[in-house]
Amino acid sequence: MSFEQEQTLARLRRRPSALWLGHLVLAAVCAGLTWSSLRPLPQWLNYTIDASAALLLLFFWLIPAWRFATNVIDFTSARIIVHGGVFGRVKRDVQVSAITSVEYSRATGITVNLGQGEPLILKGFSRPKALAETLRKTLAK
């Protein structure tokens, strides 16, 4: 009896340019906090500036960066595993044998069509046309 071991072929994340707004907010908050620390301001205003900076950083930098780090797609020799959610616990497994076709369009991104199930849509990757072609060639074997 022969068992074929599953091998990880690639691990993909969205393109890093998706974090540009978070980095812009981080730079603006740092500049604002630096400005406010160099001025003699009333205590209530310092607390207000610190609280608003913390909220801005939480919603525009920390949560998007965390989601970027936990949303991953693993391509293995037997399946495609999509990890999602804030903590990366949402998982979708797609067996390679269930994939019928791989299509690319500018509007929807890469669509991995499955025989009976809902198609898997991959968006936000750099060079999506080349990725779709590579997937087609790999899955044709």
Image: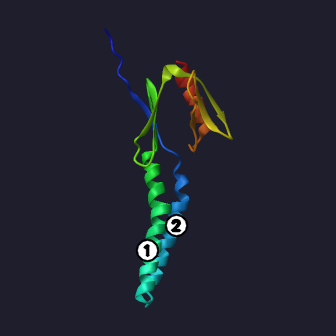
Establish if 119 lies above or below 2: below
Which residue lies at the image location 61% right of the left edge and 32% below the top edge? 111
Question: How many callouts does the rendering have?
Answer: 2
Who is closer to the viewer here, 126 or 53?
A: 53
Which residue lies at the image location 48% right of the left edge and 55% below the top edge? 64
Residue at disc 1, secondary structure: helix
Who is closer to the viewer here, 86 or 11?
A: 86
Who is closer to the viewer here, 104 or 81?
A: 81
Which residue lies at the image location 45% right of the left edge and 26% below the top edge? 79
Is there CB contact under 8 Å for labels 2 and 1?
A: no
Residue flagged by tag 2: what amino acid is it? Val
Give the crowd class for mark 1: few <14, some 14-19, many >=20 residues within 10 Å.
few
Residue 51 badge: 1
Q: Nearer the viewer, mark 2 or mark 1?
A: 1
Percent position of residue 97, x then y: 50, 19
Q: Earlier in the sequence, mark 2 or mark 1?
A: 2
Residue 1 falls in image quadrant: top left
Which residue lies at the image location 33% right of the left edge and 15% below the top edge? 3
Q: CA distance from mark 2 to mark 1?
A: 15 Å
Residue 69 badge: none
Extreme-top residue of the structure: 1
Percent position of residue 105, x then y: 67, 36
Residue 106 falls in image quadrant: top right
Residue 25 badge: 2
Give the crowd class for mark 2: few <14, some 14-19, many >=20 residues within 10 Å.
some
